[in-house]
Amino acid sequence: QVQLVESGGGLVQAGGSLRHSCAASGRTFSSYGRGWFRQAPGKEREFVAAITWNDGLTIYADSVKGRFTISRDNAKSTVYLQMDSLKPEDTAVYYCAATNTPYGYRNPILYDSWGQGTQVTVSS
């Protein structure tokens, strides 16, 4: 089992930037990839971005492509989500997750471990 601890998030005006971090402990060697998801009030959890742990391939939701950047630091077992040009519709609780499955990174069901979630609020 991988334990994930998130930091970052907060309140920002539209057009601003925020950076999330997600540090892992435990059986980190077993993770094929890490992902970021978000959930707004009254909506289902949706995929934001993912990165494969070994070779750093990245995947983005169309809604954040070109504005968000996912990256990793293998030595620190940490994944980051840089969010730029934020919009009010980006307001949500953001979760990082780890998966032991080498495919289907957009599907939250395939993720085994989840962080506690951090609130991001973008004001207009």
Image (cartoon, rainbow, N blue to C red):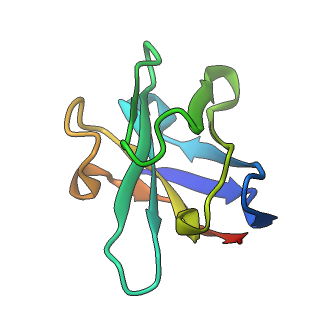
Residue 87: give x, y in percent of width and height: 61, 59
Left or right, 7 with reference to 111: right
Tell me which corner region of the image, top left, top right, bottom left or bottom right, holds residue 57.
top left
> Vertical placement of 15 versus 122: above or below?
above
Left or right, 48 with reference to 80: left
Residue 59: give x, y in percent of width and height: 38, 31
* Residue at image coords 24%, 37%: 101
Image mark count: 0
Tell me which corner region of the image, top left, top right, bottom left or bottom right, holds residue 78.
top right
The answer to whether residue 67 shows anywhere in this view is yes
| Of 72 and 11, the residue lying toward us | 11
| Of 8 and 83, the residue lying toward us | 83
The answer to whether residue 31 shows anywhere in this view is no
Q: Which quadrant, please, contains the C terminus?
A: bottom right
* The residue positioned farthest toward the front in the image shown: 124
* Residue at image coords 59%, 44%: 24
> Vertical placement of 40 versus 102: above or below?
below
Tell me which corner region of the image, top left, top right, bottom left or bottom right, holds residue 82.
top right
Residue 93: give x, y in percent of width and height: 55, 71
Residue 37: give x, y in percent of width and height: 44, 56
Left or right, 69 with reference to 61: right
> Vertical placement of 16 versus 49: above or below?
below
